[in-house]
Amino acid sequence: MIIDCHGHYTTAPKALEAFREKQLAAAKDKAALPAPGDLKIPDDAIRVSVEQAQLKLQRERGTDLTIFSPRASAMGHHLGSERASHDWSRLCNDMIRRVCDLFPKNFIGVCQLPQYPGAPPKNSIKELERCVNELGFIGCNLNPDPSGGYWTDPPLTDKWWYPIYEKMAELDVPAMVHVSASCNPNFHATGAHYINADTTAFMQFLTSDLFKDFPTLKFIIPHGGGAAPYHWGRYRGLAQDMKRPPLKELLLNNVFFDTCVYHQPGIDLLLKVVPADNILFASEMVGAVRGVDPETGHYYDDTKRYIDQAAISAADKAKIFEGNARRVFPRFKAA
Amino acid sequence: MIIDCHGHYTTAPKALEAFREKQLAAAKDKAALPAPGDLKIPDDAIRVSVEQAQLKLQRERGTDLTIFSPRASAMGHHLGSERASHDWSRLCNDMIRRVCDLFPKNFIGVCQLPQYPGAPPKNSIKELERCVNELGFIGCNLNPDPSGGYWTDPPLTDKWWYPIYEKMAELDVPAMVHVSASCNPNFHATGAHYINADTTAFMQFLTSDLFKDFPTLKFIIPHGGGAAPYHWGRYRGLAQDMKRPPLKELLLNNVFFDTCVYHQPGIDLLLKVVPADNILFASEMVGAVRGVDPETGHYYDDTKRYIDQAAISAADKAKIFEGNARRVFPRFKAA
């Protein structure tokens, strides 16, 4: 079985986006927010929205199941109000549940959280519980920068975040560290903000004792870990200069990387420096890069090809394609 | 000849740091700033400060000349006041000149600029002119985020920066894109802020027409280009999705990467995806990582070893070690 641990519902029916626009306009005018119950999207619209996109690509590329979450760039935690973020998160998570109900063999759910700049992460606990206990989701996406590019909330290793970690540990669900869009003109969303957030989270973990406090907590750093594997020597050296334990001991029981790296040399580097136990197959399709690489004749984000072609053992490939996802998402089995 | 294009004066005499502390305390209290002329550092103190550090490492590692600039983390553009930043930059640049005077075969100068959050980059022109015309420097370090981690100034591709680019073009000097310390608790300086800034600048360049406006302008993105080479497929794909020209055509006449990547697999990736014409040898010594890699028994930042061992032609090595630096820093010859 080939499990893609990182897919977003980037192809949702337009009505969802229209609701969001209406909601943000209301929040801006301090008017009454539209009622989520007023949004009616028929099953057929959902079916069509994935049939010609994610499902088609799964079939074409030979992957089986996607761990599926709402569109990351649309989480927009920095927009509207905290209340709007709550409504929007519930709505987006419910859409994921509906996709999973329609195609239970192809998708399993991960939720977005109703974060908001300056709002305590504990305010997201209720939605996390609902998604795991009621909707059967197996993980969450956690935004390390709800401000959308100004980084005004505390680092992920600050006690500010501990209530949500306590709940994650209790529910036994991991988080993918994933920012949303950037409202800072310095940062292109998928080309800078995403990658920077990955690198930033990795370094925050490296300098903290978070995993002494939460030995079972697990994070997936997407997009191949940002810059971390490319600068693995730098990070090993920084840890050493700070008299921290080696990275393997310090982080690798709790921190995992996905394979959203869109060329063979990048994947080869990742597989070379990071132990196979810490790598989860992912493509982020349909996502950040949608074209065909003229150098290969294949989609940039058809990352399965890079793993297939990599010079690693069949046992390591099996871990990356399936075993690690089952281990990092313990609720996978139950779901 | 082996030219290291990225070295900072991280070992300057303590008196320099003490001056800065006094200056920042005065700026905080809105008191009169200390006069730069009051700082007296004898030549011998300077001699000692590099003899057992940069010079020793040059000899041990077999490099010849370092393109040398003030300590990046101490530029602290976000601290004090704009006036303090001017005094401090002059002082730091003068120290570089003195090092170059004492060891003219080993060092050639690059300046820091008196940037300050919200202050127009044109305010840095005078110091750039002084450094190039009077001190014989061949380039500058340009901080893309004078706020120190909040990214509140416009992107490097905004017309806000054009006056300094006009002067750089006129003087025929390149800039290394280099942030200073981070005052944002989210960002470890050398482990996140530096690398993020590199990635950010690369993506800013990718999405703009800056080099149509300034065809001769040259930037070095340090630390191996941040995350850019590791995600080269992502960047090729993003450019393609945006209907931009291929990266080579779009950026590689103007954008260069250094080799401050502290392990062999990282350097191998860089050399594989980025043309040799766009890579400049650098170590950042004495800098971010100071230890010995237990996996190799050699200093992490002894980057010459990685290039020596890389599977590229002697002609490409010659470009990386020398030719490209002479081309990217046209004033090298004159100096």
Image: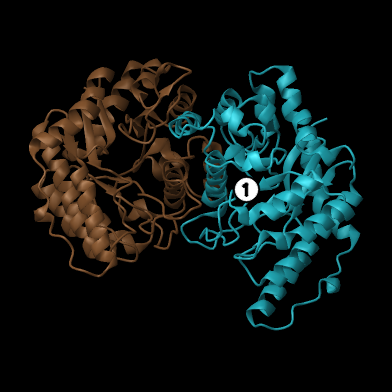
Chain colours: A cyan, B brown
In this rendering, the answer to whether A15 lies above or below B221 is below
Q: Quadrant of the C terminus of chain A?
A: top right
Q: Which residue is mark 1?
A: A288
Q: Chain of mark 1?
A: A
Using a 10 Å C-alpha cutoff, classify the residue at mark 1 as few (fewer than 14 neighbours), some (14 to 19) or many (20 or more).
many
Residue A219 placement: quadrant: top right
**Secondary structure found at label 1:** loop
In this rendering, the answer to whether A305 lies above or below A70 is above
Residue in view at x 29 percent, y 22 percent = B318
Residue B103 placement: quadrant: top left
Give residue A64's position: percent from left, percent from top: 82, 35
Residues B130 and B46: in front is B46
Give residue B128's position: percent from left, percent from top: 19, 53
Residue in view at x 16 percent, y 51 percent = B91
Give residue B140's position: percent from left, percent from top: 24, 47
Residue in view at x 68 percent, y 36 percent = A302
Residue in view at x 43 percent, y 55 percent = B149
Please, what is the three-letter code of the amino acid marked with disc 1?
Ala
Residues B245 and B208: in front is B208
Is B249 situated left or right of B8 in this image? right
Give residue A270's position: percent from left, percent from top: 58, 29
Residues B147 and A307: in front is B147
